[in-house]
Image (cartoon, rainbow, N blue to C red):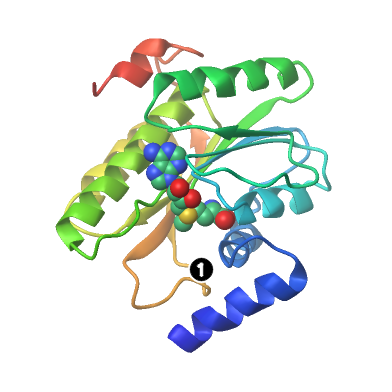
Amino acid sequence: MRKKRDVYTKRAKQEGYRSRAFYKLQQINSKFKIFHSNQIIIDLCGAPGGFSQVARDCTRGKASIILVDLARIKPIPGITEIIKGNITDVSTVFKIREVVEKHRSRKQEIVVLADCSPNVSGNWPTDHAIQIWLSRVALGISNYFLAVKFISKAFQGESFPDFLAEIKEYFQDVKISKPPTSRKTSAEVYIVAQNRRDSNLTLFDTNILLKDE
Ligand SMILES: C[S@@+](CC[C@H](N)C(=O)[O-])C[C@H]1O[C@@H](n2cnc3c(N)ncnc32)[C@H](O)[C@@H]1O
């Protein structure tokens, strides 16, 4: 398995992509056809930028892409905005909103990608709990922007069924995907949620972000 991972890491380097995660999202997109040019794509926890590169390539550079991470990210051609920030901090969401507002008149759909992962400690209960917490924060952000699609990493474990059920409250079409690039031994899967349900949510409702605080 380690060998397989190294193959993708090497390939990403050779082909000029930021990370092996590039191939995961590329495989997910081949199956679910997520991207088109009329979108604002918010890539949460996106460093070093492989997911954003997929979004850019699949939309031939026509979508607006906002890349957000705690880590500093070197500029990537074709990415609209890079924001260094913590997604659990409301001020980061307000910075994303400023960029969204600039592009909203020209782009109709908002899509949220969330490949969130803590620096794994090796302590599974802690790593799992933090990963799901970050993904739930990302779901809240997708609700704040009324995103029509939400694609999220999730570590399968004790809290996974509740997280999945929560996503189903907001989206009609929810699938679990394990792209071939993701190691079989890893608990990681991706949840692909599409078709937002009608609900009482309103755009830019700050209460959505503060729900769990
Ligand atoms: C698996 S990596 C993302 C890989 C990326 N999707 C790509 O394609 O290259 C997970 C990222 O989550 C980020 N992260 C973890 N907690 C975060 C937080 N609270 N706010 C923003 N980013 C966070 C980490 O800094 C790390 O870059």
In the rendered view, tell whether residue 175 sits above or below residue 63. below
- Identify which residue, 88 or 35, lies in the foreground: 88
Q: Amino acid at mark 1?
A: Pro
Q: Is residue 58 left or right of residue 34?
A: right
Q: Residue at x 56, y 20 (%)?
A: 95
Q: Residue at x 54, y 29 (%)?
A: 147
Residue 89 percent location from the top left of the image: 39, 25
- Identify which residue, 166 or 48, lies in the foreground: 48
Q: Is residue 184 left or right of residue 147?
A: left
Q: Residue at x 31, y 66 (%)?
A: 187
Q: Residue at x 72, y 16 (%)?
A: 102
Quadrant hosting residue 171: top left
Label 1: element kind: loop
- Identify which residue, 65 or 145, lies in the foreground: 65
Q: Is residue 37 left or right of residue 45?
A: right
Residue 3 percent location from the top left of the image: 49, 88
- Identify which residue, 182 or 83, lies in the foreground: 83
Name the image quarter holding the C terminus.
top left
Quadrant hosting residue 155: bottom left
Q: Is residue 191 left or right of residue 55?
A: left
Q: Which residue is mark 1?
A: 179
